[in-house]
Image: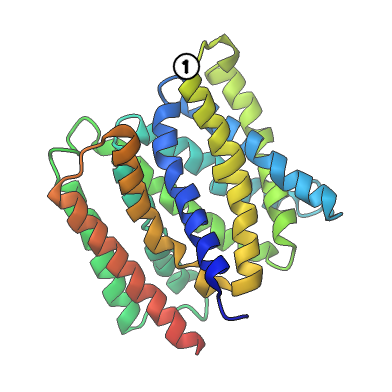
Amino acid sequence: MKQPKLLDYLLLTILALIWASAFFNIKIATYSFGPVTIAFLRVFFGAIPVLLLCYYKKIKIEAFSKDWHWFAMIGFINLVAPFFLIAYGVKSVQSNLAAILMSTTPLSSTVLAHFYTKNEKFNFTKTIGILIGFSGIVFLFSDNLLIDENNFMSALLILLGSTCYVIGGVLTLKISKKKNENVTGSILIWATIILIPLVSFIEQPWNLNPRLDSTISVIYLGLVSTGIAWLLRFRILVNNGLIFQSQVSYLIPIFGTILSYIFLKELITFKVLISLMAVCIGIYFVRKADYIKII
């Protein structure tokens, strides 16, 4: 991979900002839409730029090929379930907490990879990172000012959404030889197919009279935070590799906390800051262990 230039760092920062901005936009979307509708609109609008790129680059979409069951399963676990769980949880939890809780994905993936892959076992550095990172989450749950008996389950559901991303990532290894655009387009198609009957029977969004800000936010979540963000991620991966792209993990919870304060004036307590630091340090140790192994 080439040595990262200023443009590469700028694109990485933009990607982090886009993904971090999803959390406060989800909060705004919940003012008018239910969690199933938010999940459906995210995958529907998110599919548009990905499928257009595949059409432009003449990349064959294999959503209905012999591997359709993998695309359907990954679409449900990696898109439908987490999009629903995050939207449901954010309704009762501050979006900055959701950004921190979701940032545990690299830590959870390290734990899962230890048990389900041959070459991603724990070492001392990874273990330290996991312990520090998850201790930050435990500490965050002790913040009675922000997490209480009324929204405790909502916070756990957001963590479950994070775990779904990890499981979906492991399943994606089964079709890792296919082009990223093809895989993303195919799982977005299947996620849309799965959500159409669910949103029709559960929430009937055509009966809603949504606020303008909620409508703008849900379209943004689909087109930008889902579709364009994935395409930007592909570009960074191709040009700079996985290790460079993974640095976005440090920035998302930081930007998410800052953006939530700017746009929603959400409370930032001392425990939020300590938890944020612990999670970022934990991710640093886990990523450092992966980097040392590569070189």
Q: So how many labels did they put on this image?
A: 1
Residue 108 visible within the image? no
Relative placement, left or right, of 289 versus 19 is left
Residue 149 visible within the image? yes
Asked if 50 appears above or below 112 in the picture, the reply is: above
Name which quarter of the figure residue 47 lies in: top right
Location of the N terminus (image quadrant) = bottom right
Q: Which amino acid does label 1 sit on?
A: Arg
Q: Which residue is drawn at 51% across and 72% down?
A: 244
Asked if 151 appears above or below 276 in the picture, the reply is: above
Q: Which residue is drawn at 70% across and 43% down?
A: 49
Percent across and percent down for residue 164 are 48, 50
- The residue where tag 1 is placed is 211
Percent across and percent down for residue 33 are 48, 22
Q: Which residue is drawn at 52% across and 55% down?
A: 15
- Farthest front residue? 6
Percent across and percent down for residue 129 are 30, 72
- Pick the residue in front: 31 or 201: 31
- Pick the residue in front: 1 or 95: 1
Name which quarter of the figure residue 180 lies in: bottom right
- Pick the residue in front: 116 or 255: 255
Characterize the local packing of mark 1: few (<14), some (14-19) or many (20 or more) Cα atoms within 10 angstroms: few
